[in-house]
Amino acid sequence: MSQNNYQNPNAQAMAPSAEPDRQLYFIKVLKERMAKYMTDTGRTLTYNVVTFGCQMNARDSEKLSGILESVGYTRTDSEDADFVIYNTCTVRENANLKVYGRLGTLKKVKENRPGMLIALCGCMMQEPHVVQKLRDSYRHVDIIFGTHNIYKLAELIYDRLESGSMIIDLWKDTDKIVEDLPNRRKYPFKSGINIMFGCNNFCSYCIVPYVRGRERSRRPEDILEEIRRDVADGVVEVMLLGQNVNSYGKTLENPVTFASLLEEIEKIEGLERIRFMTSHPKDLSDDLIQVMARSKKICPHLHLPLQSGSSRILKRMNRKYTKEDYLHLVEKIRSACPDISLTTDIIVGFPGETEEDFQETLDVVRKVGYDSAYTFIYSKRNGTPAAAMEDQVPEHVIKDRFDRLLKEVQDIASHVCARHEGQVMDVLVEQINHQDAGLVTGRLGNNTVVHFPGDASLIGRIVPVHLIECKGFYYMGELYEKR
């Protein structure tokens, strides 16, 4: 339910009640208003979206950018802009501190830029104590909204301009999925596609179910139509996004499995690559493994979060699988897809973790042989069961274990990644290399980065590249030309 008591009588009287027509109405009204302002002042209005956190947030930021550009703002990479929005993450406490720090800097920017608007949205805004702190100490923020009503940005901007006061619009949960609103892709040749929202897993360390709500899946026909539109617009690779894609379809009126959805997506002509994340090990089905094995388009890469190699700690984490379950699953995946690249997430220092538990994690790392692993120091999040556990691990012990794990992961990954050295493999070229303008940078199907000589004409194309040398986590190569 909204915390904003302000009601605009004109907007309420004239705007449609049904979505997305309501938001399209506010986009139209704002567009006319912004156009008049820019004509009168001779200025171009600019915006900057700053994204913290995961790929779900990155996808939300594309939607925010699409709305802002539709009403007349022009994108800039500077936070010295007319409209700045922080799309926040709250998985770790450090992310919150970064936002507060940057808000302090923005206050000075706003003092020198009359009419500037600052908005905050995303997971961090779903925490009541955060919103109270913003009310009390960051009064220069104009709009605060959460994860469930991203699509309402145009309406919230309109309300802020009309009321002249801070707008706070937060929902505890929702079953709404609003389709067909503008979005601006970061890359013209690849896109993120939300197939579901929310999470039902309630891992004891994780705040996501509390800030993104319960699982709700998009209708398969809406997903397929969005992908077809993107492909017609030049997209060759899609990333299917969900907190747990393996449980896709369970909330639909006519349930559909993730494996079945993938089979339908594969049929879309012009689509070259399919990726997805994140997969929860407890829900990864044999049907999905077989679909991956048969597919010509699903990339040979699976992100399969481990979190801990200790069955005892996994139980405390509420992960609902054991070390043995996980290793058996990896065995089945590798049997069906021998060349697959596996990546993972690992938490070090979860409450109650002993040296023996940590050694179990190292054992899994050695047995699986990950291409890479995202390693995290346990971060206590208020409101989660783990935060109330008494046997928190001392900081110096966590740091020691983290360093040992990181070295083990890096040593193994450097050998695993080198297995394709000397081969010719397809690379999707993404950009000019940041360090050397004579190089381009792209990715193999298994997600490994490749740098090789080339120019901007290659961006967005899938080209064969001779992988000359592995540099640990990336390759140096050259464009392969058949003789």
Image: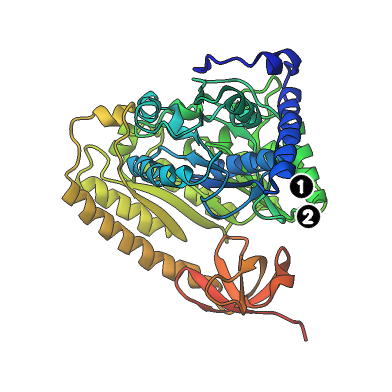
Q: Which amino acid type is shown beneath numbered disc 1?
A: Asp
Kindly identify the residue that appears in the image at 30 percent across and 41 percent down. Answer: 379
Image position of 462 with respect to 136: above or below: below
Residue at 74% across, 29% down: 29
- The kind of secondary structure element at disc 1 is helix
Q: Quadrant of residue 98?
A: top left
Determine whether label 1 and label 2 are within 8 Å by CB. Answer: yes
Number of numbered labels in the structure image: 2
Comparing 135 with 41, the one in front is: 41
Which color scheme does this rendered protein use? Answer: rainbow
Residue 110 is situated, as x and y percent measured from the top left of the image, at 47, 43
Q: Residues within 10 Å of mark 1 (few under 14, many from 20)?
A: many
x, y percent for residue 100? 37, 41
The span from disc 1 to disc 2 (Cα, nearest Å) is 6 Å
Residue 408 showing in the rendered view: yes
Q: Name the residue at the front extreme.
A: 40
Residue 52 visible at all: no
Position of residue 155 measured from the top left corner of the image (x, y, whole percent): 65, 26
Q: Amino acid at mark 2?
A: Gly
Q: Tell me: residue 80, above or below residue 388.
A: below
Up the image or down, 327 lies above or below 254; here it is: below
Tell me, for residue 234, which label it has, or none: 2
Residue 21: x and y in percent read 76, 24
- Kindly identify which numbered label has been placed on residue 230: 1
The numbered dot on residue 140 is none
On the picture, is 179 further left or further right than 281? right
